């Protein structure tokens, strides 16, 4: 598949760029940027970064399985990074934080735009490539880390990294979460742990049993079993971030 790639030096948010321009762009368009000035994180948070972070977004026009694209993206990121850094273990903190050596290495934000009975999905991915420890300290992101900071390895071809991840993601978005759910669950650091579930200002503790076919986190607590939907909550380990 030939990918339509747009390279920007600076933009407010690669997700915003695709949301604003999507109607003139083909399915599978990838936009990358050198710097994001108003990056967005999940649940309305800002996603602060310098040029050490690689931001990119993929436009999926009316995808056949729009529901679990963030989970597909998490697997796509891990696979590509594992190929480049085979000595490292990349894990997924449910639903879609990529973790290396206990630090958050990458965040994923999917946004959808409905038009008539169709839906376009913009999947935005931010990979921490080369920010320093000082960056994360000054930005007050204690759990954040970059590939360079954690492993000493540099990624010279950032555009190629984005393109390869986007290709994998495009393929998985066509196949659906079912096709990659084993790969997701195997890498998921949340499963098998006690977790704190933060929802609308309340917090409860539960045990994360597994991932449901629809991507929800299956949890159990005194009151029984229940499902957690990624859109609504933040899940943390009892003692640490993961
Ligand atoms: C999170 O973990 O909260 C999600 C962070 C997602 C950041 C990426 S960077 C590229 C794309 N553009 C944005 O504004 N956000 C996503």
Image (cartoon, helix red, strand yellow):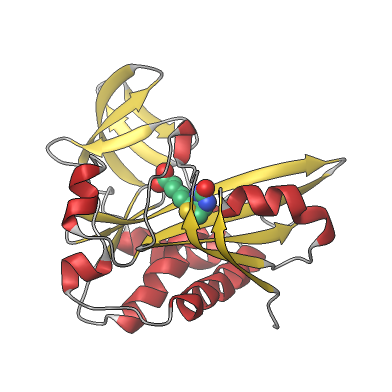
Q: Quadrant of residue 153?
A: bottom left
Q: Residue 239 location in percent, x, y?
A: 12, 37
Q: Nearer the viewer, residue 115 or 29?
A: 29
Q: Horizontal placement of 152 versus 78: left or right?
A: left
- Farthest residue in the right direction? 116
**Looking at the image, is 12 positioned above or below residue 201?**
below
Q: Horizontal placement of 12 versus 54: left or right?
A: right
Q: Horizontal placement of 41 versus 174: left or right?
A: left
**Looking at the image, is 215 positioned above or below residue 56?**
above
Residue lying at 73% horizontally and 43% vertically, measured from the top left: 113
Residue lying at 47% horizontally and 30% vertically, measured from the top left: 232
- Farthest residue in the left direction? 239
Q: Residue 123 location in percent, x, y?
A: 58, 55
Q: Horizontal placement of 140 versus 106: left or right?
A: left
Q: Nearer the viewer, residue 51 or 100?
A: 51
**Looking at the image, is 1 positioned above or below residue 228?**
below
- Farthest residue in the front direction? 9
- Residue 208 visible to the viewer: yes
Residue lying at 32% horizontally and 16% vertically, measured from the top left: 202
Q: Residue 81 location in percent, x, y?
A: 35, 74
Q: Quadrant of residue 148?
A: bottom left
Q: Quadrant of residue 69?
A: bottom right
Residue lying at 30% horizontally and 32% vertically, measured from the top left: 220
Q: Residue 4 location in percent, x, y?
A: 71, 74
Q: Quadrant of the N terminus?
A: bottom right
């Amino acid at each position: 598949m030939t990918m339509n790639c747009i390279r920007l030096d600076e933009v407010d948010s690669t997700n915003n760029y695709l949301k604003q321009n999507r109607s003139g762009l083909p399915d599978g368009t990838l936009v990358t940027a050198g710097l994001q000035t108003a990056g967005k994180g999940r649940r309305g948070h800002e996603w602060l970064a310098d040029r050490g972070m690689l931001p990119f977004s993929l436009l999926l026009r009316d995808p056949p399985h729009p529901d679990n694209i963030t989970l597909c993206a998490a697997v796509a990121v891990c696979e590509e990074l594992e190929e480049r850094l085979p000595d490292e273990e990349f894990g997924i903190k449910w639903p879609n934080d990529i973790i290396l050596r206990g630090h958050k290495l990458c965040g994923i934000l999917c946004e959808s735009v409905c038009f008539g009975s169709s839906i376009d999905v913009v999947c935005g991915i931010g990979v921490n490539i080369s920010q320093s420890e000082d960056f994360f300290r000054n930005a007050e992101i204690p759990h954040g880390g970059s590939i360079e900071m954690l492993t000493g390895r540099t990624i010279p071809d950032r555009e190629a990294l984005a393109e390869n991840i986007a290709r994998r993601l495009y393929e998985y978005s066509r196949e659906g979460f079912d096709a990659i759910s084993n790969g997701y669950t195997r890498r998921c650091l949340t499963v098998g742990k006690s977790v704190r579930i933060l929802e609308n200002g309340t917090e409860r503790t539960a045990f994360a049993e597994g991932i449901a076919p629809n991507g929800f986190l299956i949890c159990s607590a005194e009151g029984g079993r229940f499902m957690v939907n990624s859109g609504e909550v933040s899940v943390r380990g009892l003692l640490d971030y993961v």
